[in-house]
Image (cartoon, rainbow, N blue to C red):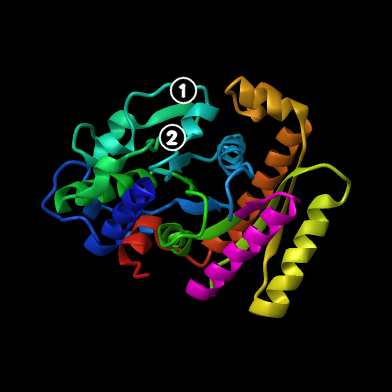
Amino acid sequence: MRDQAATLRLLSALRAYGAPSSKRNYMNAERFSERDFKAYTLAVTGGKGGVGKSNVAVNLSLALASLGRRVSLLDADLALANADVLCGLNLRNHLGHVLSGERALEEVVVEIAPNVRLIPGGSGLDELADLSRAQVIRLIAELRAMEAQSDYMVVDTPAGIASNVIGILRASHEVLIVTTPEPTAVVDAYATLKMLHKHAPEKSASIIVNDTIGVGDAERVFRQLRAAAEQFLKCQVEFLGGVPHDPELVEAVCAQTPVIDYAPEAPSSRAFRLIAKRLDQRRATRLMSGVPGFWHLFSEERS
């Protein structure tokens, strides 16, 4: 509970402090106007843990990079971050060190593949209880600078539907809800949709059904969620695709290597590339109307 509270304090502070001070010289975000923000932000979330959310975030980041896009992957879980583990990394520095002032953001960012940079979260960062204004201003400034250099920012959110997660979803350009065919996962995915619709009814949400076994499982789960959303929430959701149960994906996790690198032609790898292509086509259409940057929206966010 204390770890979750630390995450909540961080995100609440980011909302409260707003835009970075123009007095900072180091990676000063004030020099970036809204038209400079290029990153299209995808929040990868799930109502419960264990649905493969982080695996989806990592592999989608790599699949988007294979399309020639520059991707920043932010592990936003300050309690149980594991994107680095899935990539076989043993990192000494993480986002907690940036907040404490021990490191600049550029010192903790790791390039995990060509055009893919990981901003690692932490594990059990209870020391984040008291964040100073200077710490938060520095973090926002550096993240805004990084956002300006990316085509996508993929945010691996903490599990659940607490207010800290909702804040990230509201600021993102698009929300990707990961579920599995397991009934409890489907119920929790609907709960996420319900909370998102309550706090941000205009927000676009898409469904990814992970770990499917039977033919048509992904479409069946999506139809259930779409029907519930239309009947009870009066909102629309979109289907991005399914990722089949894949022994090579299980092997890749054990080998601490993203499956898209471990077995590029595995069924799960092909599924991730197909979803990435759909997202990239959607991004091209939506960016024509102009979208503000994630950290601009996040610092204005009032939940």
CA distance separating discs 2 and 1: 11 Å
Image quarter of residue 150:
top left
The residue labelled by disc 1 is 89
Image mark for residue 118: 2
Image quarter of residue 228:
bottom right
Find the residue positioned furthest to the front. 1
Label 1 crowd bin: few (<14), some (14–19), many (20+), radius 10 Å? some
Q: Along the polypeptide, which appears first: circle 2 or circle 1?
A: 1
Task: Work out whether residue 211 or residue 126 is closer to the camera in this orientation and state it.
Answer: 126
Q: Position of residue 182 (x, y in %)?
A: 74, 50
Q: Is residue 161 above or below residue 69?
A: below
Q: Tell me which segment is drawn in magenta.
A: 177-201
Q: Is residue 31 above or below residue 62?
A: below
Q: Main secondary structure of the magenta part?
A: helix
Residue at 45% x, 57% y is 165
Image quarter of residue 271:
top right
Q: Position of residue 184 (x, y in %)?
A: 69, 55
Residue at 65% x, 24% y is 252
Find the residue positioned furthest to the left. 23
Q: Amino acid at mark 1?
A: Leu
Residue 122 horizontal side relative to residue 174, left or right: left
Question: Is label 2 in a helix, a strand or a loop?
Answer: strand
Residue at 17% x, 41% y is 26
* Residue 264 visible, this angle: no
Label 2 crowd bin: few (<14), some (14–19), many (20+), radius 10 Å? many
* Residue 291 visible, this angle: yes
